[in-house]
Image (spheres, rainbow, N blue to C red):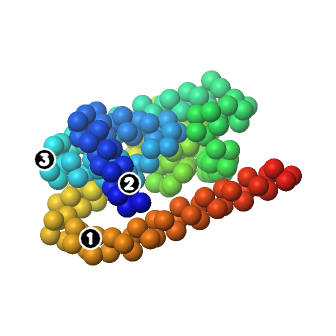
Amino acid sequence: MLEFLHNFLDTIAEIIRSLGYWGIGIGMMIESACIPLPSEVVLPIGGMLVADGTINMLGANIAVAVGSMIGSLGAYAVGYYGGRPFILKYGKYFFVKEKHFYHAENTFNKYGVAAVFFGRLLPIIRTFISLPAGIARMNIFKFMAFSLIGMIPWNFLLIYLGYKFGENYDEIVGPIYHRFEYFIAGVIVLIIIYFAARHFLKTKKNKAA
């Protein structure tokens, strides 16, 4: 399991490395368009590429900001032109779970345009907040401004953490990781078993109903 995870991350890193700025930009565009490619994976990898000199810090932050904005505008357009009924009916076909949409929608309804700013700093809401903003026909220039201001600190933080990780891997992170790799693998396996069991029980319950 640990080897699979390591190979998976290596594959993503190599794709991003081969594409450079385009790689991290496209990765963030995908996440911001409500497709499950977590920024918690893309951005630290981008930071590690900064650490080894493949890309630079300023360029990395610009690339992810542009990619995030393009993806967010795509999701905004789906909400604006498709509306709530379209998302609830067809969202599952482009990776939008109803519970995630409702969570973002409730946040937007409660806090209004401010949710577009602080929502960029929160898990799940960050990815889906563009949909209710589009449904509400929020002014597109306000949407872009609030989104950009909210994206910058989150993007910079995760890129910087990836940068420090890559910078100190050989001296600090690597030895600690290898010492506890079996423990880490065990935790990962338990997490996967938990979610698999929960999914199985939920499916069984739905069939019984």
- Name the amino acid, label 2: Phe
Which residue is found at the position 59% from the left and 65% from the top? Answer: 194
- Kindly report the distance in space between the C-alpha atoms of the residues bearing marks 1 and 3: 25 Å
Which residue is found at the position 62% from the left and 33% from the top? Answer: 93
Picture coordinates of residue 82, whole percent (x, y): 65, 26
Could you say which is closer to the camera, residue 150 or residue 126? 126
Residue 154 visible in image: no
Picture coordinates of residue 8, whole percent (x, y): 36, 49
- Quadrant of the rendered image containing residue 92: top right
17 vs 43, left or right, is: left
First reached walking from the N terminus: tag 3 or tag 2: 2
Q: Are marks 1 and 3 in contact (CB under 8 Å)?
A: no
Which secondary structure lies at badge 1? helix
- Quadrant of the rendered image containing residue 167: bottom left
- Name the amino acid, label 3: Gly
Q: Which residue is mark 2?
A: 4
Q: Which residue is mark 1?
A: 178
Q: Which residue is mark 3?
A: 53
Which residue is found at the position 21% from the left and 44% from the top? Answer: 58
